[in-house]
Amino acid sequence: MHERLSFYIKRDSLLHRLNPLTKMTLVFSLVLIAFLSPYYWTPELILPLVILPLVILAKISKEYGLTTLRLILPTAGVLFIMQALFLPGESQVLFEIWRFDVTQASLESALTNATRIVVMVSSFTIFLLTTHPSEMMSDLTHRGIPPQFAYVVISALQILPQMQAKAQTIISAQRSRGLETEGSYLKRIGVLVPLVGPLVFGSLVEVEERAIAIEARGFTSPHPKTFLRQIPDTKFDRITRTVLIALIMITLGLKIWLSLN
Amino acid sequence: MALIELKNVTYKYPLTISPVLQNINLQVNEGEFVAVIGPNGAGKSTLCYTLAGFVPHFFKGELTGGVEVAGMESSKSHLHEWVLNVGLAFQNPFNQISGAKYTVFEELAFGLENIGIPREEMITRVNDAMKLTGISELADRSPYSLSGGQQQRVALTSILVMQPKVLVLDEPTSQMDPIGTREVFSVIRTMAERGMTVIMVEHKVEWIANFADRVLALYEGSVLLDGKPQEVLTSDLLLDKGFGVSRYTSVARQARKMGLWKNDSLPVTLEEAVQGFSLTPSLLRQAQDSASPKGRGE
């Protein structure tokens, strides 16, 4: 069975020690600045000057590298090709592929948009790799979000791998009684039909039992909750958050000011 | 006055015709360890849910009669108050894991966080409870990576840390090996001696005979027998109704028909059986004879 149920990589680094809210602010400010900045070169600069140093600082180069190869580059690559081919541009046609014109303008905006996506997915990846989910949720519950909401998020993260394992068990059970699960793609899709019933209804029954179990442990108690995990929120955290929010404001202001002129 | 008092409790699940519990009357004193036995569908789990307040607060349906624990009436209390008095652990350990925590330690602290226990006390309580149930070495494991028996211990411990007055357990050892079962029974025995009242649904009759103070036999939603383990577990009334009967009882019952069992009462455990049969010297001689080689006299 899986021991590892989240993306979190346990390391000791400045980034790991930051308060989850600070990290979240960092992620959102990077994304907002990359998307809102009126200058096309902003995302291109964020990538080598912010994202890469953060990855090295957090000591997650290997994991980040793997994610980049498997997820970020393919996504951004597809986006780049689509935009380069299909974005209408007034400017000079550089070359043609079949019946599509690739212009300088379409190439430029394709590059900017693809880089924005890379920045966005990278920021979230760094966040997920350095933040323990229950740390994040404890912190947010501490700050006043409803514990029910926190519970739904965390348990969904945990229960997905369990559902996967259960689906595998059901498939094995059905195969052992002669259900054919191999062969053409059409056949394999057909196999999913008898799987859905037991999986979905089984999960509904489980939900009832789990509701009883957490109720038995005082989940709906109106008493103010206490927390096992202590999550430090230092002066450095608070200053960082203020600076980041100021940067978002500056970018927003710049965009509005430039579009007015 | 008794700590738990059930008066004429009858309960019917929604959309069903016949009641699952019929006219249950039960009084349990503080610190008593009561085992509940019964065939499938006898209403054992429903009795547990009723004691733990989930009937009528979670399962709707029709409940009549009175359920009182520590002077509080269940239908007039909130479920979140009720669970502070009555802790419930049930059979399937997998569904009792909150799913919100990544280590066993955090999992055990979950209930304490919910009811607002200060952090220092939380840590002490979790450590003590883990020591008691022998799961200290699992503290940093993911609750999902444990075996069924280990998960059952975690589920039991997660209720023990909340220190309820009454502990309601629905087959808490169903996935455990004999060693685990023995440990859990002795933990529960210890808790009862410390003043916790325990109601435990269990099929393992020999263990019940060794550890429980009292046995309640449920049959088709009613109390069939209620009394000392030795008397209830060896009663002829349990025969042919799907109750679990100890093999020692069965052997002795058979032996009594053949005139080989001289005691008034039937045994439940191995010790009682050995002690009873040793009162029959002729039997001992017979056993020796039949064990010896046939052709000896020739």
Image (tube, rainbow, N blue to C red):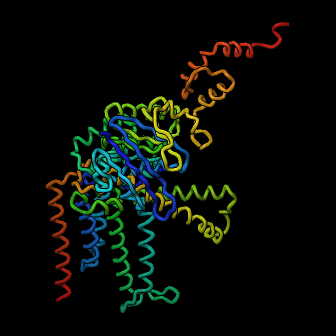
- Left or right for B41, reference B82: right
Q: Disc count in the image? A: 0
- Hey, which residue is sitting farthest top in the picture? B298
Q: Position of residue B81 (x, y in %)?
A: 27, 52
Quadrant location, the N terminus of chain B: top left
- Left or right for A57, reference A248: right
Vertical placement of A173 versus A188: above or below?
Answer: above
Visible residue check, residue A168: yes
Visible residue check, residue A62: no
Which residue is more in the foreground, B258 or A86?
B258
- Hey, which residue is sitting farthest bottom in the picture? A90
Which residue is more in the foreground, B44 or B264?
B264
Which residue is more in the foreground, A122 or B214?
B214
Quarter-of-image position of residue B270: top right
Which residue is more in the foreground, B225 or A190?
B225
Q: Position of residue B166 (x, y in %)?
A: 34, 42
Quadrant location, the C terminus of chain B: top right
Q: Position of residue A178 (x, y in %)?
A: 70, 59
**Residue at 68% from the left image edge and 57% from the top image edge:** A177
**Residue at 20% from the left image edge and 87% from the top image edge:** A259
Q: Position of residue A45 (x, y in %)?
A: 28, 70
